[in-house]
């Protein structure tokens, strides 16, 4: 077969939809008895932090996906997640129900209760399931996510509770002193669950606590999970420890934990706890890969190393979909989340179409002049969900060719730089380079006025950026002024400066084009 996909979570199902629509020979192997098994357990406290906004004031389905972080892409209106619950932060069980409906109603080719136990490669891949059946495929796409717990190298950590298996009943922690290792959403979700019963809760980890509303990375601590911060700053026996856990010693009464503080006067302090919970994230489970197909790993060996095509850097034909794709924009954009990777999965399907089936990336054709391309760009940045969600990561690409220009939508910018030669333009939505250095609620910090084209390049908020490339080199760039309601249709503030930039750069492509 052409494609074997491992995992029937949201990424595997999304890729299955595109493979099936293209008429490719594929199968999805899922270890669990139904789609979306992961969401049957995680998040442990059963509330998603992906927003579900039903009412936007607009009837454009493309625009509305900007506020819908849970739906997968399809051509069916009944498969929008917003129809499953009105809750802004939905229950995880609603996601389980949605994913099972998605797989069933689209009749995707999924084999359930079929755990993959080995992936090997000779000329083609040979994938063996738990029943001993061997599948042969030209390409394998791993869509399992980083499914194994990431255990940092701390002596004694093997004796503590893990986020994936610890009790979620607060009564089990009544009157206890609890240490939670980790500073992400799972750690604070766990801490918030114990506030009413635990005597003392410490949340510990190296590095500064990063808040999503400041960094714009939705994997950093979300406001919905940060109630615990009040109990710390308002002196309610709880604390955040900035430092490294050096050792965890278990004894009959609990744990003695050695903490090296980053900011306090103590070099090392030993603190006693009744319970310790590790909420330290996840990593790729590479136990299924034979030596002939084992991918190189990066980022503390948590993720597979990938090219701009999301292909393994050392195993040709081995690709990754979903949260594993975030290697290319780690902690910068949204590839680790459904509202981001639904678009990177679509981009992956287009890359596979082009690479393996000689199918050109979908595009429209426009006159190669500034007014026509200005119209096309303004129309896209005002409604595109992919550019909005995958800021800086995905971009539209315009390739001038004589009197016409091809307009390609939602191409990974890194992929464009790696594969295109000659002159082309990228269109992205981006925050300013120092956006996470400024407190957005500090009114003493001056901001660039909206609709100020002369200072648009200084804007911290999300705004369109158009770059003129030749090969991998940036020749020029133009920033479109930010706008409170993200409406970039103003004639003087938005359209005219863009038109002038394109007119000048298109002239340069003509003047510097090779003769003949």
Image (cartoon, rainbow, N blue to C red):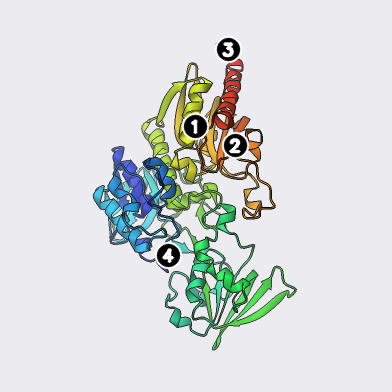
Q: Which residue is mark 3?
A: 515
Rounded to the nearest angstrom, the CA distance separating label 4 from label 1 is 39 Å
Q: Residue at x 38, y 51 (%)?
A: 54
The answer to which of 107 and 234 lies nearer the viewer is 234
The answer to whether residue 150 shows anywhere in this view is no
Which SS class for mark 2?
Answer: loop
- Looking at the image, residue 144 sits to the left or right of residue 259; the answer is left
Q: Earlier in the sequence, mark 4 or mark 3?
A: 4
**Quadrant in which the N terminus appears:** top left
CB within 8 Å, label 3 to label 1: no
Image spot of residue 451 (x, y percent)? 59, 36
Image spot of residue 141 (x, y percent)? 39, 48
Q: Earlier in the sequence, mark 4 or mark 1?
A: 4
Q: Which residue is mark 4?
A: 43
Q: Which residue is mark 1?
A: 378
Q: Which residue is mark 2?
A: 451
Q: Earlier in the sequence, mark 2 or mark 3?
A: 2
The answer to which of 154 and 209 lies nearer the viewer is 209
């Amino acid at each position: 077969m052409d494609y074997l996909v491992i995992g029937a979570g949201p990424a595997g199902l999304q890729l299955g939809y595109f493979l099936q629509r293209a008429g490719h020979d594929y199968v999805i192997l899922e270890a669990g008895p139904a789609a979306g098994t992961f969401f049957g357990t995680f998040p442990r406290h059963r509330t998603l932090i992906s927003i579900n906004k039903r009412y936007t004031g607009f009837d454009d389905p493309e625009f509305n996906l900007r506020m819908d972080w849970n739906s997968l892409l399809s051509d069916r209106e009944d498969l929008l997640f917003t129809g499953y619950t009105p809750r802004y932060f939905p229950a995880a069980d609603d996601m389980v129900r949605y994913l099972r409906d998605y797989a069933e109603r689209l009749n995707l080719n999924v084999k359930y209760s079929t755990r993959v136990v080995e992936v090997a490669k000779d000329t083609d891949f040979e994938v063996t399931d738990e029943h001993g059946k061997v599948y042969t495929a030209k390409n394998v796409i791993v869509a399992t996510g980083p499914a194994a717990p990431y255990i940092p190298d701390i002596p004694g950590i093997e004796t503590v509770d893990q986020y994936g298996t610890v009790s979620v009943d607060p009564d089990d922690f009544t009157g206890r002193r609890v240490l939670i290792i980790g500073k992400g959403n799972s750690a604070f979700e766990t801490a918030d669950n114990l506030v009413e019963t635990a005597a003392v809760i410490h949340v510990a980890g190296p590095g500064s606590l990063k808040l999503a509303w400041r960094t714009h990375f939705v994997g950093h601590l979300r406001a919905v999970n940060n109630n615990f911060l009040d109990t710390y700053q308002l002196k309610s026996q709880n604390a955040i420890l900035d430092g490294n856990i050096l050792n965890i010693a278990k004894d009959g009464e609990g744990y003695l934990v050695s903490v090296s503080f980053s900011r306090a006067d103590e070099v090392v302090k030993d603190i006693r706890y009744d319970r310790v919970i590790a909420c330290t994230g996840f990593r790729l489970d590479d136990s299924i890969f034979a030596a002939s197909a084992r991918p190189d790993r990066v980022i503390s060996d948590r993720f597979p190393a990938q090219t701009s095509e999301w292909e393994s850097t050392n195993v040709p034909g081995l690709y990754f979909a979903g949260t594993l794709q975030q290697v290319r924009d780690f902690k910068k954009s949204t590839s680790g989340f459904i509202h981001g990777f639904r678009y990177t999965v679509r981009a992956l399907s287009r890359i596979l179409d082009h690479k393996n089936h000689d199918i050109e990336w979908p595009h429209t054709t426009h006159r190669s002049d500034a007014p026509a391309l200005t119209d096309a760009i303004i129309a896209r940045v005002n409604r595109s969900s992919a550019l909005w969600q995958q800021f800086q990561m995905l971009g539209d690409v315009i390739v001038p060719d004589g009197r016409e220009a091809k307009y390609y939508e939602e191409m990974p910018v890194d992929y464009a730089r790696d594969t295109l030669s000659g002159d082309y333009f990228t269109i992205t939505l981006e925050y300013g380079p120092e956006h996470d250095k400024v407190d957005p609620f500090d009114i003493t910090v001056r901001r660039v006025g909206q609709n100020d084209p002369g200072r648009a390049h200084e804007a911290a908020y999300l705004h369109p950026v158009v770059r003129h490339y030749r090969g991998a080199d940036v020749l020029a760039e133009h920033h479109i002024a930010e706008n409170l309601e993200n409406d970039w249709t103003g004639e003087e503030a938005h359209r005219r400066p863009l038109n002038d930039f394109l007119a000048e750069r298109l002239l340069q492509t003509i003047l510097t084009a090779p003769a003949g």
